[in-house]
């Protein structure tokens, strides 16, 4: 107790230097608190937007060497050329999932990319081929604006309200329910065209970065549009032209080039018996096991008390034999969500550098203060004060300063958030608005961020005390008396 009161006396006695230390730590604490509050708000906004509207808590996909999201590869260089693989062993995996506890929703999706042509407007779209029977029940964040939700088994498509309004601005005509939508997709060897009716117009409760580009459509149409991108055999890829230039002209049309096709018998006859034999070796069951029902993903929602990371770790052990892997919502979203995590890491790396500079500054201030107290410290050592007592005194002074600075930094942050929210500032940029959960700028006081900020301030003060304590313990009583 005596040490505490002595530390308070020394702090009050040296108000000028201590005020500088408190301000410096408080500013760093404030920046850390506000910056991470903004990032966490964006993270929570993305989490809420995608889980309730698009990805669910967990997505199952075919295991691949390339990290992929619901619409392509997470590597920007590879993405334009990447083909999402078909889900393997679909029925077997569904049996495993259905036996798990804590699941509130399961649905399937096949993804694709195409061009939408309507009233002379041609736009690239992301196709979300869904199991309509389960999809809309699982995602309450999808809000019907006009028409009706897509029905199971029917051909049709739903566009976002944002896209409908864009079409109206460009053509002067707002799309009507029942209008025909033309979808085209192309590749090296041709293109596919499909026309389906507009069944509904929808919006997302909290649209993410690319969600307004999505078209919800029947899975049959997506499979047809994607079919030109699937290789016809294991040895020949239709997206690779090089084999044409390395083959003899007479071999290009040889049936042996495509090893998935039945070959002609030695007598040159293609008999019914031979065809039946070939079909028996390539049964429907084998083909089904390979394609997995022609879906790309299985999406899962979990109960609120179930940890997605724990569920993923558990289920991946069971799915490993089937070549399937479970990933969280951030991987399913792709680059936009991963970039937000990267921004958070880079921001805190910047804060770390600021902290290093701050520690150096505080160390210099404390060293000056220690040198000014040489006589006092020497006297304490002369009357029998131990090294532990001296170091405790200096450390306690800095902890008191750090605690005061941490409280001040969080209090200033709270006031800043309150003032900012009262201004109701409008965010004109759609990208930033989607990250922050709306076009009105609002921040939330997040308790765990405040606690981390406070702990950072205290840790900051402790680290800055280490070297000054070392210098303090080197002061000899006789030298202090001579300097005094």
Image (tube, rainbow, N blue to C red):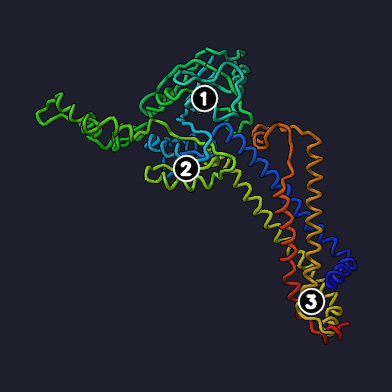
Residue 182 visible to an observer of this rendering = yes
Q: Earlier in the sequence, mark 2 or mark 3?
A: 2
Q: CA distance from mark 3 to mark 1?
A: 70 Å
As drawn, the residue found furthest toward the right would be: 13
The numbered mark at residue 216 is: 1
Residues marked 2 and 3 touching at CB (< 8 Å): no
Question: Residue 173 appears in which quarter of the rendering?
Answer: top right
> 438 or 400: nearer the eye?
400
Residues marked 3 and 1 touching at CB (< 8 Å): no
The numbered mark at residue 301 is: none
Looking at the image, which residue is at 57% across and 36% down? 51
Looking at the image, which residue is at 80% across and 54% down? 407
Q: Earlier in the sequence, mark 3 or mark 1?
A: 1
> Which residue is under mark 3?
390
> Which residue is under mark 2?
326
Image vertical order of residue 32 relative to residue 441, above or below: below
Residue 227 rendering spot, x and y as whole percentages: 38, 27
Are there few (<14), some (14-19), or many (20+) residues within 10 Å of tag 1? many
State the SS at label 2: strand
Q: CA distance from mark 2 to mark 1?
A: 23 Å
Q: Quadrant of the C terminus?
A: bottom right
State the SS at label 1: strand
């Amino acid at each position: 107790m005596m040490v505490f009161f002595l530390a308070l006396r020394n702090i009050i006695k040296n108000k000028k230097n201590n005020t500088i230390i408190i301000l410096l730590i408080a500013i760093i604490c404030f920046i850390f608190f506000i910056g991470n509050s903004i990032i966490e708000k964006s993270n929570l906004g993305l989490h809420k937007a995608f889980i309730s509207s698009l990805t669910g808590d967990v997505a199952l996909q075919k295991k691949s060497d390339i990290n992929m999201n619901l619409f392509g590869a997470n590597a920007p260089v590879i993405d334009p050329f990447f083909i999402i693989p078909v889900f393997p062993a679909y029925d077997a995996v569904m049996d495993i999932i259905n036996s798990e506890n804590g699941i509130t929703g399961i649905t399937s999706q096949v993804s694709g990319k195409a061009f939408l042509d309507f009233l002379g407007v041609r736009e690239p779209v992301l196709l979300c081929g869904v199991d309509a029977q389960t999809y809309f029940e699982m995602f309450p964040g999808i809000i019907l604006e006009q028409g009706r939700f897509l029905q199971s088994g029917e051909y049709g498509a739903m566009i976002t309200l944002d896209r409908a309004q864009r079409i109206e601005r460009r053509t002067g005509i707002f799309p009507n329910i029942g209008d025909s939508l033309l979808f085209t997709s192309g590749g090296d060897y041709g293109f596919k065209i499909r026309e389906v009716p507009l069944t509904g117009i929808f919006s997302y409760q909290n649209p993410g970065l690319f969600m307004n580009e999505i078209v919800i459509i029947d899975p049959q149409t997506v499979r047809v549009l994607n079919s030109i991108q699937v290789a016809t055999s294991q040895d020949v890829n239709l997206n690779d032209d090089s084999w044409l230039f390395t083959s003899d002209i007479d071999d290009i049309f040889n049936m042996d080039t495509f090893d998935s096709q039945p070959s002609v018998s030695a007598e040159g006859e293609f008999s019914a018996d031979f065809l039946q034999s070939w079909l028996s070796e390539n049964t429907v069951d084998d083909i089904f096991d390979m394609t997995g029902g022609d879906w790309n993903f299985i999406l899962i929602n979990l109960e609120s008390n179930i940890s997605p990371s724990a569920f993923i770790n558990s289920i991946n052990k069971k799915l490993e034999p089937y070549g399937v892997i479970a990933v969280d919502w951030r991987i399913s979203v792709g680059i936009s969500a991963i970039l937000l995590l990267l921004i958070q890491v880079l921001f805190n790396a910047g804060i770390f550098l600021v902290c290093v500079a701050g520690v150096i500054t505080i160390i210099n201030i404390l060293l000056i203060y220690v040198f000014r107290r040489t006589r006092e410290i020497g006297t304490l050592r002369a009357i029998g004060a131990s090294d532990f007592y001296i170091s405790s005194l200096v450390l306690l002074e800095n902890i008191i300063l750090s605690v005061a600075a941490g409280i001040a930094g969080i209090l200033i942050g709270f006031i800043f958030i309150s003032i900012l929210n009262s201004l109701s500032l409008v965010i004109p940029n759609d990208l930033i608005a989607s990250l922050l959960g709306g076009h009105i700028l609002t921040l939330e006081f997040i308790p765990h961020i405040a606690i981390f900020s406070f702990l950072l301030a205290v840790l900051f003060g402790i680290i800055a005390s280490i070297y000054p304590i070392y210098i303090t313990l080197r002061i000899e009583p006789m030298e202090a008396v001579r300097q005094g």
